Amino acid sequence: MTSKDRAILKIGDQSWDFPIYHASIGPRVVDIASLYKQTGIFTFDSGFTSTASCESRITFIDGDKGTLLYRGYAIDELAEKWDFLETCYLLLHGELPDKSQAKVFRENISKHNTLPEQLHNFYTGFDRDAHPMSMMCGVVWALSANYHNSMDISDASDRMLACMRLIAKIPTLAAMTYRHHIGEEFVSPRGDLDYASNFLYMCFSGESKEYSVNPIIARAMDKIFTLHADHEQNASTSTVRLAGSSGANPFACIAWGIACLWGAAHGGANEAALSMLEEIGTVDRIPEYIKRAKDKNDPFRLMGFGHRVYKNYDPRAKIMQQTTHEVLEELGIKDDPTLAVAMELERIALTDEYFIERKLYPNIDFYSGITLRALGFPSSMFTVLFALARTVGWSAQWKEMIEDPKQKIGRPRQLYTGETVREYVKEEER
Ligand code: SDX
């Protein structure tokens, strides 16, 4: 990054200047890395609302326009025209694969989609009713035990192998988590099914009957994975980057990302949004919940609404809504009451001054729960599916961070407002 533009900081009669770097698209940045050294002052940006933590070439979001690009390709084009594994290749390599690259990539994913027997036994440590996200944190972390000594993150081929193993194994782990949760035997992946179909097969095939994957449902699942694949420096991706900046094992870093995604303010919102819509129950009860969402004394928020970056409609939510209609139609589910509540809630909120003024729109989590429930998943599995899809984004961002020549361990500072130095007082004198 080079720049002739400079930003001037003036405090009292002193001033300092800092380089400004231009983005290929999106906001410029002021490089303040030398601020403390020059001025003895920190910046303060709790929640990182105005802070770029890194330089990246993977995903771009324009929050005002509501656009999302993976390596320059618009999300709606990718979701409609390509499949998830081609999107994985794009996020990892920076270009869409040609025919032979796509073939080799799919074969590689297929080669790595099984798990060592010890991992199967790992599940016996979980109660069946443990939250599936708690199991996912545990089993993905356990992968770091299997792939620790055999991996050197300073080696490019080892880094790519770690990413391929993660993308290949995460659907199998997610399906095993689901099967353990419902008390069913594990089902191994098949070599003749595509990524999304294999995942549905591993989840829903029964002992007695041969499960045949509905191609329209599999396509919808694949599209949902693409929509969730990456999203710039969100909380869980920033967690993976910060963890990885110390040189930690990439499987352990992804487990940290899963833990962060679980929160209701982040990926856990899809589960919370469906329970909110089910709690509202009928359209006539919407005004009561809108009132609560606006009441500062009520902690209730509309789950699946609002976004730190999107101050316009989340482009993924639009595609998600279309996919919801496609899935419900294919499954012959007419007049889903929860969908009716969701659409009326959206209509009312988008005409309400409170939401308009704060630029609060539906985000990806608002409709996803209705679709995933229709696909047969319990709401406790919704964030697991988000984590399954986001594993490629976390992996690509981890890889980019490790390969950044300017990379160093992340170590933020603080505004300290605690006690100043004070003398120890003996117990009898307190
Ligand atoms: C994801 O970052 C990513 O990219 C994440 C993600 C990804 O793909 O990785 O997109 C996935 O996490 C989507 C977001 C899922 N979370 C939810 O749907 C939970 C509900 N949403 C809110 O909790 C909230 O909107 C956040 C957390 C998403 C964003 O919060 P911000 O940016 O910190 O905004 P804020 O809390 O400063 O709110 C600004 C104002 C406040 O009102 P005022 O104090 O100005 O009067 O908007 C209000 C908030 O009270 N507000 C809401 C609201 N969200 C914000 N009021 C009611 N309902 C809401 N959902």
Image (cartoon, grey):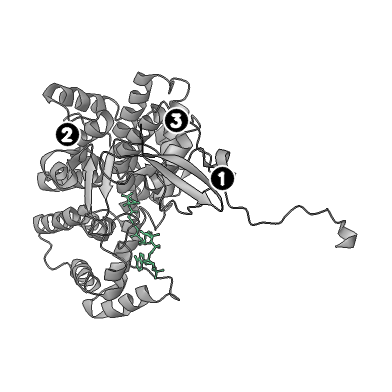
x, y percent for residue 273:
31, 63
Q: Earlier in the sequence, mark 3 or mark 2?
A: 2
Q: Residues within 10 Å of mark 1 (few under 14, many from 20)?
A: few
Residue at coordinates 21% horizontally, 54% vertically from top-left?
Answer: 65
Which of discs 3 and 2 lies nearer the camera? The answer is 3
Residue type for callout 2: Leu
Toward the viewer: 328 or 175?
328
Q: Residues within 10 Å of mark 2 (few under 14, many from 20)?
A: some
Residue type for callout 1: Arg
Which residue in the structure is indicated by mark 3?
407
Give the spatial CA distance, label 1 vs label 2.
Answer: 49 Å
Toward the viewer: 224 or 6?
6
Give the spatial CA distance, label 3 vs label 2.
Answer: 39 Å
Residue at coordinates 86% horizontally, 58% vertically from top-left?
Answer: 427
Rendered image quadrant of residue 285: bottom left
Q: Is residue 278 visible?
A: no
Q: Identify whether 165 is placed above or below 358.
A: above
Q: Residues within 10 Å of mark 3 (few under 14, many from 20)?
A: some
x, y percent for residue 72:
20, 38
Which residue in the structure is indicated by mark 2?
193
Which residue in the structure is indicated by mark 1?
413
x, y percent for residue 263:
42, 54
| Disc 1 residue lies near ligand 1 with CB under 8 A | no
Residue type for callout 3: Gln
| Disc 3 residue lies near ligand 1 with CB under 8 A | no
Q: For the residue labelled by badge 2, is the local secondary structure a helix, a strand or a loop?
A: loop
Q: Identify whether 398 is placed above or below 332.
A: above
